[in-house]
Image (spheres, rainbow, N blue to C red):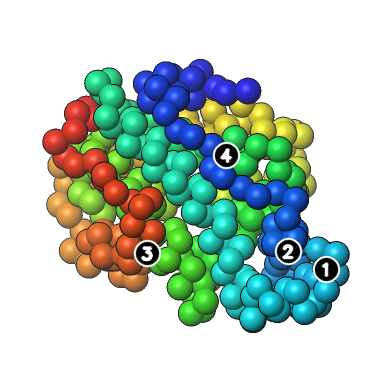
Amino acid sequence: MKTEREKKVSARTGNSVQEPEHAPGTRLSAILNAAERVFGEHGYAGASMRNIAEEAGVAQALVHYHYATKDKLYEAVFERRSSAINQHRGKLLDALFASESTATVEDVLTIAFTPLSEIFHGEDAVNLALYVQLVASVSLGSDERSRRIRETYYDPIAERFIDALHTVLPGIAREQAVWAYLFSVGARQQAHALNGRAMRLGARDRARKSTAHYSDLVRFAAAGIRELVRNETGTNARSKEPEGRVAKLSSGRTKKSQAGTVANTPTRSVRGRE
């Protein structure tokens, strides 16, 4: 069930986004699903091609035929999901800023936080949750493999959302838009963590598909972003240059490896005042 804000965004975009194409039921899909589960449950180091083949119910030779190394299979797990997710969200952003209505922070976050169950209809919820866990892992990883996956599959769409936030929040520096995005993504990953921590800390049992839970996340992130903007706007910019990934996102220097998913970035000329 969609929230009221999702319905408004859908109405404004004219429901122009087509569902991503998948090929469920194939042996290749079975291998990727199995890899997603094994990597998600045991991590990269704890997974083996043999375990993945057994989980998929196929010969290990077939796994090696499609993916010569564990590293290539690991990256393929991210490529499969991210390409569909980025295309879906990118088209929604295009439609949002092409509409005549004024875009808001909530509109941008509604798109950024689109539940994966609405993009991958009918797919196993545990698999999707494990994928989110894998993304969180590479988001924080300092190793070369994590850096490569981040820059290839996630930084291009991150730039689109940063530009969108920069557009709907006139007057802020792009660096602040970068932090607004990264803080929001961190909240999203924690909200969908498959570790039961919230329950152990005393949270009530709220289904991850709950529209109330989803709406709370959007409202929480939007309020935090507005407070960040309130504190930063009109003050001196930070003297220290941003470092690492923040520096790349601030200057728009990420690798455009998925050019089809990052085109038509909104500019400052788009109406975005709230």
Q: Which residue is mark 1?
A: 58
Amino acid type indicated by mark 4: Ile
**Circle 1/circle 2 CB separation < 8 Å:** yes
Q: Which residue is mark 4?
A: 119
For the residues labelled 2 and 4, the Cα–Cα distance comes to 20 Å
For the residues labelled 2 and 3, the Cα–Cα distance comes to 24 Å
Amino acid type indicated by mark 2: Ile
Q: Which residue is mark 3?
A: 257
Position of 56 relative to 148 (above/below):
above
Position of 101 relative to 148 (above/below):
above
For the residues labelled 1 and 2, the Cα–Cα distance comes to 8 Å
Q: Quadrant of residue 205?
A: top right
| Residue at 49% over, 25% down | 6
Residue 238 x/y as whole percent:
21, 59
For the residues labelled 4 and 1, the Cα–Cα distance comes to 27 Å
| Residue at 83% over, 74% down | 59
Amino acid type indicated by mark 1: Val
Quadrant containing the N terminus is: top right
- In primary-sequence order, the first of circles 1 and 2 is 2
| Residue at 77% over, 79% down | 61
Residue 242 x/y as whole percent:
27, 65
- In primary-sequence order, the first of circles 4 and 1 is 1
**Circle 2/circle 4 CB separation < 8 Å:** no
> Which callout, 1 or 3, points to the residue nearer the camera?
1
Residue 159 lies left or right of residue 151; in this view the side is left
Residue 54 lies left or right of residue 227; in this view the side is right
Q: Give the number of callouts.
A: 4
